[in-house]
Amino acid sequence: MDNHRNGIAGFRLTEHTWMTELGNWIDAISPDGRRAGALLFDPRVIGLPGVRERVVNAVMTDQHLVLGGMGGLIPVADVVAAGDQVWLLTAQAVSPTLADLLAGAPVDPAGAASVLTETAQTLLALHAAGVTHGSVHPGTVVITAEGAALLSERGLSDAIRGQVSPRERDAAGWASLARGLAASFTQTAPRAAGLFERAAGTATTLGLEPARAMLSQERAALPGGLISRDALARAARGRSAFAQPPSFAAQPPPAPQDEGDIVTLLHVPASGSPPRLQFGPGVGGPGAGPGAGAGTVRQPETTAERIWREGRDGAATVHRPDKRSQGRVAKVSRRRRRRRTILSTALFAVVMAGAIVAWFRLTDAPELAVRSIDVVAPKKTLGCGGAIVLTGTVVTNGGVGEIRYEWRKNLDKEVVKGSLRTSADKTSYAVPLRWTLSGKSNVKATATLKVLSPGPARTDKASFTYKC
């Protein structure tokens, strides 16, 4: 941050910073004086071939979802390049996270149920829109001052890895979240802990929708029978990394400083003004408050928007947000730094073209499925103290995602687990197993390969002779 120690593109940086796999997150103040966030990508990550373009595509996908009625995500204000540095700027604070709150004190059961309900609702809406989050864990669940649970870093982990996570990965992340929260209530609220454990199991076996419905239908297991944000909001306000003095809102943005050639990597709307950003239920989601959509033409309701509406009406979450937060619109900084050279313009055109191509590849890609598996063992007899390699071949439909598998051996109890990432341009994957045997024996050794996900589970096996 040497070149941008005090700010970037009009955002004022604070001293509160933390590291993630993506880079360096920093609490910031937006040009209009609100709490915001800034992520300086790790140059070793963002500099890899194709990563910058995939990050831009992920952010533009989020903007597409917001325009379609999506809520529950931390809104991105801009992605800018400053020399070799790439920054992601958010229109909402990115702290505290659920991980921050859990590090301080246990979250109350009503608040935990609220977090699980809202994050499940967001993931379901993402899946209905044809995308996934890819990295759901306590560090990517942001708790607002009103107690709402918003997801950050959507698609960014996948972008740096060049993959598209399947829905099952999101469900598994949510289930892990539920089990982690359940563990904190085993002694103090065992009925709530049991509810969260059951919801986690349901998410893994049946999906997020039945798990989310279970939380609402069995809320009697919660103290007072309530799903509430109240205590969560108080905990979030108490854990905020820095307080925003009232003077911030009254002060004009700082005078522009020469920060060098800063280029936005995102598309600027033709109207010259940013789209209206929407937040989770109770923070300005679709139909969130009086006058929502007033003066605009209401577009046909999308599947994502329907999920948000039904989720908001059906969850009956008790919350008391600050009235000033109703209808709060996160304003994207309109100050666009000069594009000084033809090279900058060409770069923007290339990024846009790549984002469009990646968008169509994302939406057109089939859901990952395994068509067949085959295990082959060498026909020769293995001698004393020797090692042999069995080869499993997994054939897919060309979908993009993750395959989880395990090897089992008939001569011992060892289970060798593994996973692999698939790509759209490849359908056959080798899964080898190296097996070493020793001692005097004359036996038939059999190795069994089982593909665990995506389902249904498939198995195949092969045998060889060990003689010593």
Image (tube, helix red, strand yellow):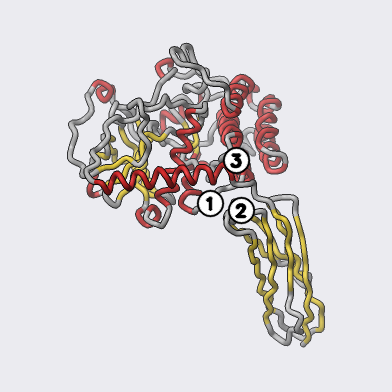
Left or right of 8? Residue 69 is right
In the depicted structure, whether residue 342 falls above or below residue 62: below
Closest to the observer, 312 or 55? 55
Is residue 461 at least partly visible in the picture? yes
Q: Nearer the viewer, mark 3 or mark 2?
A: 2
Q: Would you name the residue on which mark 1 appears?
A: 163
Q: Would you name the residue on which mark 3 appears?
A: 174
Circle 2 crowding by C-alpha within 10 Å: few under 14, some 14–19, many from 20: many
Q: Distance between the residues labelled 3 and 2?
A: 17 Å
In the depicted structure, whether residue 1 falls above or below residue 121: below
> For the residue labelled by badge 3, is the local secondary structure a helix, a strand or a loop?
helix
The spot of residue 453 in percent (x, y) is 68, 52
Kind of residue sitting beneath label 1: Gln
Circle 1 crowding by C-alpha within 10 Å: few under 14, some 14–19, many from 20: many
Residues tagged 1 and 3 counted as in contact (Cβ below 8 A): no
Total tally of numbered discs in the picture: 3
Q: Distance between the residues labelled 1 and 3?
A: 19 Å
Q: Which of marks 1 and 3 is in front?
A: 1
In the depicted structure, whether residue 369 falls above or below residue 289: below
Q: Would you name the residue on which mark 2 appears?
A: 402
